[in-house]
Image: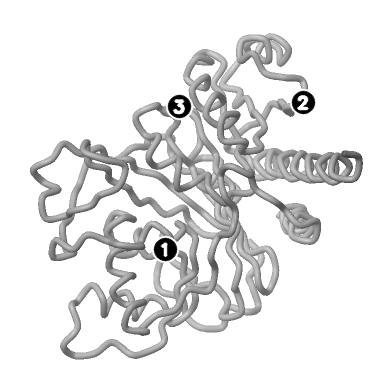
Amino acid sequence: MSPEPAGEESPDRLYTVTGGRGGTDESSLDSVALIVAESEPAADMQSEHADILRLCLRPIAVVELSAELGLPVSVVRILLVDLLDTGAVTVRHHVPSTPQEGPRHDPDTLKQVLLALQRL
Amino acid sequence: MPSNASERNTPAPGRTPLAATIGNALKIVIVGGFGVGKTTMVGAVSEMRPLSTEEVMTQAGAEIDDLRGVRDKRTTTAAFDFGRITVDATRVLYLFGAPGQKRFWFLWEQLFIGSLGAVVLVDTTRVEDSWYAIDRLEHHGTPFIVAVNRFGPGPDLERVRGALDLSNDVPLLECDARRRESGRDVLITLVHHLASMERARSVLKETP
């Protein structure tokens, strides 16, 4: 693991591949919601949709899709809503916490995280 | 790096897929000013090379509601990095390095919601870069700790605590973001803090 240089905040880029659709419920997709493909890419599919399906043969977080596709997270969310609507992908993980209440952590999760960190 | 026995398939260059059994993703956010070492810390503890991505927001609102017009609106782009640590067969922990400046609040909202907690990474020569982050974390009720990334001699931790106006309940420690063991210790400190907060909360529940 070589440490990365401290340079951050890359220059602005912007992509518009969503055909102008505005998401209805994509805000419910958390940045680490895990996406799993439920079908093969189809020939008549938009290329970004097909790319997503190829990337989520195994579970993959929304942000990881975003990084792999080189698309902003919000754009990936909108693309995912299309695929969710047709059942081409499913979500394995919804984040239940509400910001008002603050997060709740069950002791088992914290314990397992601790063990994983201690193995580093 | 020890190899993971579950990764039999040849991974795509640069990215190792998660195990098929993973069903729960957790997140911890490392937030701090420009150049404070967030990416370095994420990279030091991550099991994969950190990935970068970005989020955009139009000036018009908190969410992009019409991407057709997005080029015509004034937009803010926030780049951020992340890495991950596999916890067990079903859980994975994502680590985000998030810029701490005020103009990136829209990115924060989505990273902090549902997160386990946060690490505020501080450079003692620019302590004021952390004020906004700490204020927002307190406002959101997101549990956090503060880690001072040492770049050289600087004020001791009690002075830093004073400069940040940090309550004594918030753990404060020094680290070297380049070192894996140091980054690990920072995260362990956060998880211990979360566990003690949970204990306090359950005690509170029992004594109305």
Circle 1 sits on which residue? A62
Q: Position of residue B12 (x, y in %)?
A: 40, 74
Horizontal relation, residue A19 to residue B18: left or right: left
* Residue that lies at the very extreme toward the front in this rendered image: B208
Q: Which residue is mark 2?
A: B169
SS of the residue under disc 1: helix
Quadrant of the snapshot with the N terminus of chain B: bottom right
Looking at the rendering, which quadrant does residue A110 occupy?
Answer: bottom right
**Mark 3 — residue?**
B33
Q: Are marks 3 and 2 on the same chain?
A: yes
The correct choice, above or below, for B146 with respect to A44 in the image is: above
Q: Residues within 10 Å of mark 3 (few under 14, many from 20)?
A: many
Residue B94 position, x and y percent, is: 55, 55
* Amino acid type indicated by mark 1: Val
Q: Which chain is mark 2 on?
A: B
Mark 3 or mark 2: whose residue is earlier in sequence: 3
Indicate whether B44 appears above or below A37. above
- Front position in the image: B147 or B178: B147
- Circles 3 and 2, Cβ within 8 Å, touching? The answer is no
The image quarter containing residue A115 is bottom right
> Label 2 crowding class (10 Å Cα cut-off): few <14, some 14-19, many 20+?
few
- The kind of residue tagged 2 is Asp
**Do residues under tags 1 and 2 come within 8 Å of each other at their CB atoms?**
no
